[in-house]
Image (cartoon, grey):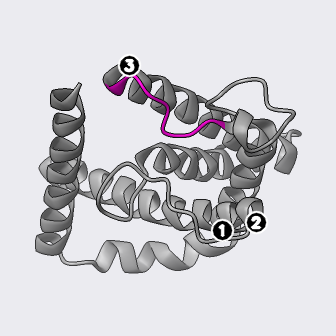
Amino acid sequence: MMKRTLDGSFRFLLYGVIGFLLERVINLVAYGTWFDNSVLFGPVQPMYAVGMMGALWAHHVLPKTPLGYAGRLGLAYLFTALSEWVSGTGYFWLTGRNLWDYRDTFAFCQGPYTCFVPTAMFAILALIFAVFLAPFLKPYEKRFPTILKGILVGLFMLDILITYGGLYAAR
């Protein structure tokens, strides 16, 4: 049970790092610069881990259905949009300020936390990763030393506690 929890936490962390990198690519396209609007100190974005894991789940669950890639993309989009909305709303609730506001980036976005174009770009990149790159990563993920997984997951949890504890205390 403990090993499964550690493996799942490590997978979440790993996909949060990959999501962080994918968002940097999207920001590079949107802003023309390597823009970092992350909350945590480390190079990980948990809300995009949810989007990445949603894309992986959709890829494994829907391949034999008539929905095919369109259904997988739709689910990846929904996972990402929901995690963006929950994260943006939660951050605002904790701090009283917006970390990002898509209305300042794209004129056609109605809400501050989710917008079709950047969220769809992330979902497409996440699905491409799920289809083409994740199968190559899986054997390395399984062979990664347990002690290193524990240390990295511990540092990730510490990052969350320091970041959100400090944000809440500063409020």
For marks 3 and 1 on the same chain, the one whose residue lies earlier in the sequence? 1
Asked if one can make out residue 62 in the rendered structure from this viewpoint, the answer is no
The residues tagged by marks 1 and 2 sit, at their Cα atoms, a distance apart of: 6 Å
Asked if residue 13 lies in the magenta stretch, the reply is no
Residue identifier under label 1: 25
Contact? badges 3 and 1 (CB < 8 Å): no
**Element at label 1:** helix
Magenta part of the chain: 95-101
Amino acid type at circle 1 is Val
The quadrant of the rendering that contains the C terminus is top left
What's the residue at 19%, 78% (across, down)? 145
Near mark 1 (Cα within 10 A), the count class, few <14, some 14-19 or many ≥20, is some
The mark that comes first in sequence, 3 or 2, is 2
Q: Residue 93: which numbered mark, if any?
A: 3
The secondary structure type at the circle numbered 2 is: helix
The residue at the point 78 percent across, 24 percent down is 110
Whole-number angstrom distance, CA of label 3 to CA of label 2: 29 Å
Which disc number belongs to residue 29?
2
Q: Residues within 10 Å of mark 2 (few under 14, many from 20)?
A: few
